[in-house]
Amino acid sequence: MTRLILTILAIISASLHIWGEYQGPDYLIYIFKPLTMIFIIIIAVLANEPPSRRYKIAIIAGLIFSMIGDVLLSLPVDAFMIGLISFLIAQMIYTYAFRAGRPLRIKFIAILPFLIYGVTIFVILLPGLNGMAGPVAAYILVIMIMAWQAWDQWEDKRTRWALLAFIGALLFVISDTLLAVNKFGEPFAAARVLTLTTYFSAQWLISNSNYT
């Protein structure tokens, strides 16, 4: 019941944030984006039977760094690079969570879809990246590794919680792709609502992967 209440609160908070993105005032963005993440973090914190203690701590840490990135990207100053670094750290922590305790398995057929997707997105974005090509390439590499490891965990465990983590990872990739296309490619009106709904859904699923 507590998890359901927190989920409802997160949905309300996320909706208010999205409303603020389109209609204002700006304080709705500053308040409700981090507040949505706080509700999602609490869901992870309250998990009493996680896959492992290490997994739970890593997921919570990844959520916290994501929230820090959210705050930095919402500021009325250009903090994109710092925010990108914060999300880069979050992806690295998620990668650690997804592969902790398992031997590294290198299957080219499993890596190939993530490699193709990452290269394709980078090539599409490249004309608009200017001086950001290096950082964006690094971020794409890290998030593709994260998604690959989420899939590898699901293939290995075949549990409900591993599936939630994998779907969450895929939604995270979709969200960041939409964000990047809107920022460095062709902006489009629905970008923010699509980016935010997939982003919050991704974080909610990853948070709930703490429940076995």
Image (cartoon, rainbow, N blue to C red):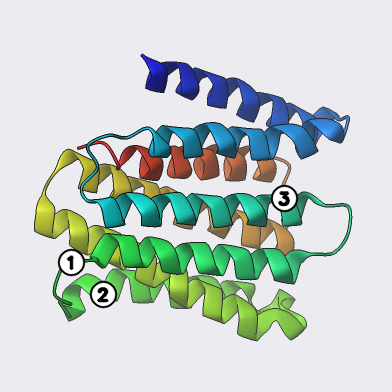
Relative side of 65 to 104, left or right: right
Relative side of 124 to 205, left or right: right
Q: Does residue 170 appear in this view? A: no
Which residue matches tag 1? 101
Secondary structure of the residue carrying numbered label 3: helix
The reply to whether discs 2 and 1 touch (Cβ–Cβ < 8 Å) is no
Relative side of 98 to 40, left or right: left
Marker count (numbered): 3
Secondary structure of the residue carrying numbered label 2: helix
Q: Badge 1: few (under 14), some or many (20 or more) residues near its Cα, within 10 Å?
A: few
In front: mark 2 or mark 1?
Answer: 1
Where does the image place residue 142, in percent across and percent down from the top left?
45, 73
Q: Does residue 79 appear in this view? A: yes
Q: Residue at x 13, y 44 (%)?
A: 159
Three-letter amino acid code at the position of disc 1: Gly
Which residue matches tag 2? 111
In front: mark 3 or mark 2?
Answer: 3
